[in-house]
Image: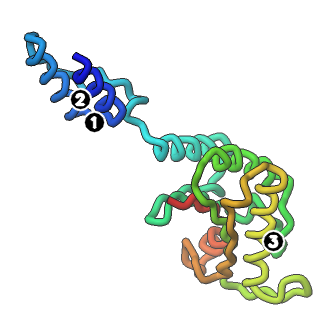
Amino acid sequence: MLLGLFILLYTASNLDIQKYEKMLNAFGNVFGTEPTKIKIDAIPEKVISTPLDKLKNDITQLIAETDTKSIRMEENERGITIHILEDIVFPSGSAELKSTSKIVLKRVADIIKKLPNDIRVEGHTDNIPIKSSVFPSNWHLSVARALNTAYYLIKEEGVNPDKVSIVGYAEYKPIESNDTPYGRASNRRVDIVIIK
């Protein structure tokens, strides 16, 4: 009986629907009862959800609540990326955060500071050259935007600095073609990457 209890506890901690059904049928045979057929919908949904599912749900909810097309989520081999387009976070040609950006970044911080994952903040621009006294190139602008975003998350929202890194890509990692105004607007962004 004691061995059976430990097997039950171990199996429950690594729950798999098919294994769960086999386990219950095996216990039925051991204790002389009829094998039980388990319906999939009998297993509570929260038991089979994963931290990744919860993270994606949190980000999807953030996007829905902000009611904008300027925040997007992408999942790839690196992890989950939150694209925040320029019109939310920065004035054109500037690296100073808008007041509206701080509302969004606070919500993002609430999600990421609970995670053990490393966070990379990436700055991006379109392919139109910039040359000003403050930013001699798109490289300078993209790095400054990543730095200011990361610094805000750390200093104002309490994200652990040990987990944060920054990088500037200038125009060299576009997510849309730079041949249209829509594409260029999509490429002017800050990405917050939750590393796998």
Give residue 48's quadrant in the image: top left
Q: Which mark is residue 20?
A: 2
Task: Measure the C-alpha gap from mark 1 to mark 2.
Answer: 6 Å
Most foreground residue, 21 or 185: 21
Question: Please, what is the three-letter code of the amino acid marked with disc 1?
Answer: Asp
Q: Callout 2: few (<14), some (14-19), or many (20+) C-alpha neighbours within 10 Å?
A: some
The residues tagged by marks 3 and 2 sit, at their Cα atoms, a distance apart of: 56 Å
Q: Where is residue 120 shown, x and y percent of the image?
A: 64, 65
Please state which amino acid type lies under the numbered disc 3: Ser
- Name the residue at 33% across, 26% down: 9
Label 1 close to label 2 by CB (< 8 Å):
yes
- Image disc number at residue 16: 1
Q: Nearer the viewer, residue 175 or 52?
A: 52
Question: Marks 1/3: CA distance?
Answer: 51 Å
Q: What SS does tag 1 mark?
A: loop
Q: Residue furthest top?
A: 33
Amino acid tagged 2: Tyr
Check disc 3 and report the residue beneath it. Answer: 92
Q: Residues within 10 Å of mark 3 (few under 14, many from 20)?
A: few
Position of 71 with respect to 93 (left or right) is left
Q: Position of residue 136 (x, y in %)?
A: 83, 89
Splitting the image into 4 quarters, where does residue 188 fall?
A: bottom right
Taking 181 as reference, is 1 left or right? Answer: left
